[in-house]
Image (cartoon, helix red, strand yellow):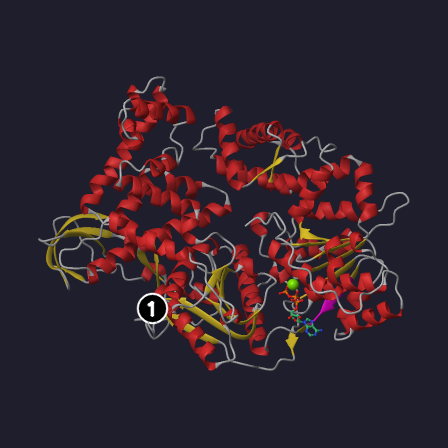
């Protein structure tokens, strides 16, 4: 999600008929006049304010970004500012692109001389220009999260750190946090206490040294290095201070300490140079990047940080109907640690909000597709007016499938398409290797993923053996210990890998694709590595793998329900289906009627945007709010801010939906929040736990069933005889797990299967 490079500049807007002259003449003044027309009082104050640092705090849709854009245009038109003197910082490439577009629409191609970019790309620009002062080659490389984790892995190995205790991902995440706080290795080493901190300090020091040697910077370095450069080279800092007379920052609530320090460096005055004018806009209620070190402190303390600061509040919302705003306010009002705000709209009550409770996530996606279809048929909505939001990237898959099926054009913004994601590709490579022992590409892809001590050298040894004896790479793997020059460690790793695949092949003979997949992901350690990681992206990867297991399960169910006589769900069949879907996935959606396409995106990517019609989906406990936040007040407050962001993207129509059951790991997970119509315990007050949960969610306790009260299914043990509504009489062979997760392997005579007891319609005899 780290936005790095500016998206290519959009084609410059046509030059306005009357280009404002460089020096303010009568025409420019007229322009300036036009710029402030149509703004409300406080907005106008913000646009025309000159001199002291300016903070604009306001709720969603109150025109903060608009003020920023108009302010830039006003600086050019009325205050004789040269575009090159302006730097405007936004949070994502998308936002930067849109701002450039907006400014270009106002001032024409001159907009290109300004720096409108993300923090990261602004820093790359400075570092490329000043590489000598920063002690870097001009061609320094930039490591993304994956690269830096790989490097950390090497470092940890070199330091002989126990990978169980100090997984590379965890170390990398902690180093990232330190960099966001501008703590360098020396500082951290000096203050590190206890074995864990000392290990981290060692890892940080060596990691940083290796980065230096490789002339590489990781993402967090881009900002930290720039700040340190400006702090240690006054003449460099001075040149930028001289250059940038206006610094503007959008979404200030999402800046972290390093970014704050960068701004501070840029706007500090030096001898002979007045401090630059600073203008930041933000909304503490929309702070949704705490996990990346963002701190709303930067907003709350603005007046302390910058002397003479002026604060302007905006209260009128121009985006949404009052109904939508009321919903947004109702959600955010539950956060205790916030200043209450009054946000109002002149747009009138508008359409009512529509809520929908679907039985499954498929039913939810079906409903969304049907509803979009209906709106489009009615005539005043185009697909391009509609956005569908969800909490995690993995949730896009069901929507994509349904939209492909019904022919609704869509695009997924942010996040790689599901089948292009690394973890999904890795998992599919495992399955391909199971099905086809000779699939060299897939074998090599996962040979050392997760790491099992098989380095490039070992791989080369196996390759040499395969070409010497003219056997496939897969066959050579089986004889790896005979490969000349191979180390024992690597040979053992390979034997382990071969055994893993053989085990999976055996399982594939009788088991379902999802069982094979799950077995591979667990037994290979792939899953554990992700689960133990502290890198927030890895949680998303686990979600995606869960989702893939669900895809496999659906495939199996489809074959079981609709397959031909005697047809069995196989891994090969599953892979074939995936290949077809993944292929369809690549087809660019053409847009002959310029109707636009439906936008699918996560809530995090939706920040700053607006759409006439918004679907906020997956509103179940554990999905959104995310499982990690349940029971943690601070995290729950962040989830509410995320919901607030989502709701306030909507201009006219808002839909809220959720599914009663949603597949995770191929097993439907029951929502703990059950609507009264479905609940069997409509009138019970529930347990104290239920009451607590109800209070937290602000719903009637009688409508809740907590997870512990979910039907757990009959208690059975090996040897018991059971009767299944569909499969008839059977005998329990084995039981695994407990509580709502318990599963039993049951022999029904003609077939044996694993069933989740909670869902299985069985009676113990
Ligand atoms: P967010 O908090 O979501 O980033 P924001 O405060 O940046 O929102 P904008 O995106 O600038 O809000 O504005 C929201 C919408 O309201 C835009 O469509 C914008 O053009 C419109 N708008 C803002 N101010 C005015 C105004 N004075 N008159 C008419 N429309 C306005
Ligand atoms: Mg905005």
In the rendered image, residue 83, in percent from the top left (x then y), is placed at 79, 55
Q: Which quadrant of the view contains residue 363?
A: bottom left
Residue at image point 72% right, 55% down: 112
Q: Residue furthest top?
A: 485
Residue at image point 33% right, 55% down: 580
What secondary structure characterizes most of the magenta part? strand
Q: Is residue 262 visible?
A: yes
* Front residue (pair 170, 108): 108
The stretch of residues the image draws in magenta is: 311-315
Badge 1 marks a residue whose secondary structure is loop
Q: Which quadrant of the view contains residue 68?
A: bottom right
Q: Which residue is mark 1?
A: 359
Q: Residue furthest right?
A: 272
Residue at image point 48% right, 33% down: 166
* Front residue (pair 165, 556): 556
* Front residue (pair 694, 36): 36
In the rendered image, residue 177, in percent from the top left (x then y), is placed at 59, 42
Q: Is residue 689 visible?
A: no
Would residue 314 be counted in the magenta stretch? Answer: yes
């Amino acid at each position: 999600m780290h936005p790095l490079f500016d998206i290519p500049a959009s084609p410059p807007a046509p030059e306005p008929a009357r280009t404002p002259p460089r020096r303010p003449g009568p025409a420019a003044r007229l322009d300036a006049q036009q710029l402030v027309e149509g703004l409300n009082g406080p907005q106008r104050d913000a646009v025309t304010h000159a001199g002291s640092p300016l903070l604009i705090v306001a709720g969603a849709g109150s025109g903060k970004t608009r003020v920023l854009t108009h302010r830039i245009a006003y600086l050019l038109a009325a205050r004789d500012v040269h575009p090159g003197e302006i730097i405007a910082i936004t949070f994502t490439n998308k936002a930067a692109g849109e701002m450039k577009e907006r400014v270009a629409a106002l001032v024409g191609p001159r907009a290109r001389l300004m720096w409108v970019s993300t923090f990261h790309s602004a820093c790359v620009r400075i570092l490329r220009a000043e590489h000598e002062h920063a002690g870097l080659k001009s061609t320094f490389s930039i490591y993304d999260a994956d690269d830096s984790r790989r490097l950390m892995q090497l470092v940890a190995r070199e330091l002989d750190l126990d990978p169980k205790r100090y997984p590379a991902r965890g170390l990398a995440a902690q180093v990232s946090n330190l960099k966001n706080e501008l703590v360098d290795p020396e500082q951290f080493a000096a203050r590190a206490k206890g074995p864990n901190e000392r290990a981290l300090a060692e890892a940080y020091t060596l990691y940083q040294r290796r980065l230096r040697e490789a002339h590489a910077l990781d993402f967090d370095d881009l900002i930290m290095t720039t700040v340190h450069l400006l702090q240690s080279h006054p003449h460099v800092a001075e040149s930028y201070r001289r250059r940038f007379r206006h610094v503007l920052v959008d979404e200030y609530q999402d800046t972290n300490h390093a970014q704050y320090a960068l701004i501070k460096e840029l706007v500090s005055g030096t001898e002979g140079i007045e401090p630059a004018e600073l203008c930041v806009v933000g909304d503490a209620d929309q702070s949704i990047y705490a996990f990346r070190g963002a701190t709303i402190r930067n907003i709350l303390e603005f007046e302390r940080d910058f002397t003479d600061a002026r604060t302007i509040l905006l209260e009128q919302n121009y985006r949404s109907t009052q109904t939508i705003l009321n919903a947004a306010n109702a959600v955010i009002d539950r956060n205790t640690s916030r200043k209450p705000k009054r946000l109002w709209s002149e747009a009138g009550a508008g359409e009512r909000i529509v809520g929908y409770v679907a039985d499954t996530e498929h039913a939810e996606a079906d409903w969304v597709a049907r509803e979009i279809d209906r709106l489009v048929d009615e005539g005043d909505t185009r697909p391009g007016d509609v956005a569908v939001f969800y909490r995690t990237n993995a949730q896009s898959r069901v929507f994509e499938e349904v939209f492909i099926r019904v022919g609704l054009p869509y695009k997924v913004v942010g996040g790689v398409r599901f089948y292009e994601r690394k973890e999904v590709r890795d998992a599919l490579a495992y399955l391909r290797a199971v099905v086809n022992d000779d699939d060299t590409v897939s074998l090599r892809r996962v040979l050392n993923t997760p790491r099992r001590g098989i380095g490039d050298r070992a791989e080369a040894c196996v390759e040499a053996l395969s070409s010497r004896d003219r056997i496939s790479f897969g066959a050579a793997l089986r004889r790896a210990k005979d490969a000349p020059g191979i180390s024992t460690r690597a040979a053992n790793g390979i034997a382990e890998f071969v055994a893993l695949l053989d085990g999976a092949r055996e399982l594939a003979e009788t088991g379902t694709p999802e069982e094979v997949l799950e077995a591979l992901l667990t037994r290979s350690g792939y899953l554990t590595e992700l689960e133990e990681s502290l890198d927030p992206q890895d949680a998303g990867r686990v979600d995606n793998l869960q989702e893939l297991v669900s895809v496999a399960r659906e495939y199996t169910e489809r074959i079981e329900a609709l397959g031909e006589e005697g047809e069995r769900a196989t891994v090969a069949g599953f892979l074939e289906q995936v290949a077809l879907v993944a292929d369809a996935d690549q087809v660019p959606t053409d847009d002959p009627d310029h109707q636009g396409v439906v936008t699918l995106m996560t809530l995090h990517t939706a920040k700053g945007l607006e759409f006439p019609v918004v679907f906020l989906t997956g509103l179940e406990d554990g999905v959104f709010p995310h499982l990690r936040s349940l029971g943690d007040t601070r995290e729950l407050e962040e989830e509410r801010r995320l919901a607030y962001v989502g709701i306030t993207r909507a201009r006219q129509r808002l839909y809220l939906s959720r599914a009663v059951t949603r597949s995770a790991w191929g097993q439907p997970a029951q929502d703990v929040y059950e609507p009264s119509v479905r609940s069997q315990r409509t009138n019970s007050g529930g347990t104290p736990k239920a009451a607590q949960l109800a209070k937290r969610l602000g719903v009637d306790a009688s409508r809740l069933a907590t997870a512990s009260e979910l039907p757990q299914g009959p208690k059975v043990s090996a040897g018991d005889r059971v009767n299944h509504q569909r499969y008839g009489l059977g005998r329990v062979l084995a039981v695994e797990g407990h509580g709502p997760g318990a599963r039993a392997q049951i022999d029904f005579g003609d077939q044996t299967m694993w069933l989740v007891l909670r869902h299985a319609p069985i009676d113990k005899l």
